[in-house]
Amino acid sequence: MSSQETDEPADQQRRQLAGRMMQVLPFFGSWTDSVRDQRFGSSNLGHRQIQILYTLRHGLLATDDVTPSALATLFGVQPSVITRVLSRLESSGHITRTVDPRDARSQFIRITPEGYDVSVAVERYYLDSMIESMAFLTDEDLPVLEECMAKLSRIAIGLENRRRASVGREPLPFPDSPLPYQPDGVI
């Protein structure tokens, strides 16, 4: 019996929720992609550039010696994709690349003060837009949404782990509790 043929009400409800998530999530993706239409200082940034600056600013990789290969692995893309994005970021003064003294074929990526400031501005833009869109929520709604976010995060990690397994990568751990947002002094 396929998953569509189940008669269990809970299974049908999960299917309905999954379908609603599939309908809603693209709107978030479209909205985050639309940041390209915004200028931040002298910069127009693409989504991948924003992701890389955010990753560097928040230290999301477990090392200070961030390499293009580590970024490609993190984002699940070919190194050539990252190389093109890094070239744009470097030419706009948002990052620097230095040669690894132990291996001349490798480079270390660092965010510049300008890249840091642009990343903060983008994050503020995202946060302010989201907060404005959440104005209809009551104080009672906020804990419910927090609980839902924790569950959505587990679903997202589960989906990411399925993707990782399909390409032979290690799974991400499921956090014991929702990770708190760390604004890095933004707000």
Image (tube, rainbow, N blue to C red):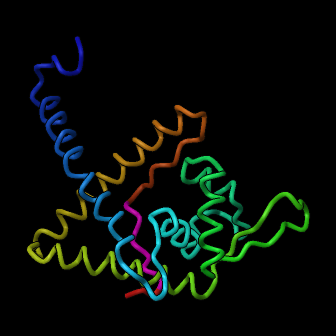
- The secondary structure that dominates the magenta segment is loop
Residue at 19%, 79% (x, y): give it: 132
- Indicate the position of residue 164 as horizontal and vertical percent values: 53, 39
* Residue 61, horizontal then vertical, whole percent: 62, 63
In depth, the one of 174 and 89 nearer the eye is: 89
Q: Quadrant of residue 103?
A: bottom right
Q: In the rendered image of this protein, does residue 167 appear above or below residue 181?
A: above
Q: Is residue 100 left or right of residue 161?
A: right
Where residue 104 sits, quadrant-wise, is: bottom right
Residue drawn 45% across the image and 55% down it: 175
Q: Is residue 37 left or right of residue 131?
A: right
Observer-nearest of 177 and 41: 41
What residue appears at the point 66 percent right and 51 percent down from the top-left corner? Answer: 79
Looking at the picture, tell me which residue is in the foreground, 143 or 133. 133
Q: Is residue 14 above or below residue 66?
A: above
Quarter occupied by the C terminus: bottom left
Residue 54 image point, x, y percent: 51, 71
Q: Is residue 149 magenta?
A: no
Image quadrant holding the N terminus, namely top left
- Dividing the picture into quadrants, the one containing residue 169 is top right
Q: Which residues are magenta?
A: 178-184
Q: Is residue 44 left or right of residue 156?
A: right
Decide: is 85 above or below 21. Answer: below
Residue 11 in the image: x percent, y percent?
Answer: 17, 29
- How many discs appear? 0
Q: Is residue 180 magenta?
A: yes
For the point 60% across and 33% down, which residue is it? Answer: 168
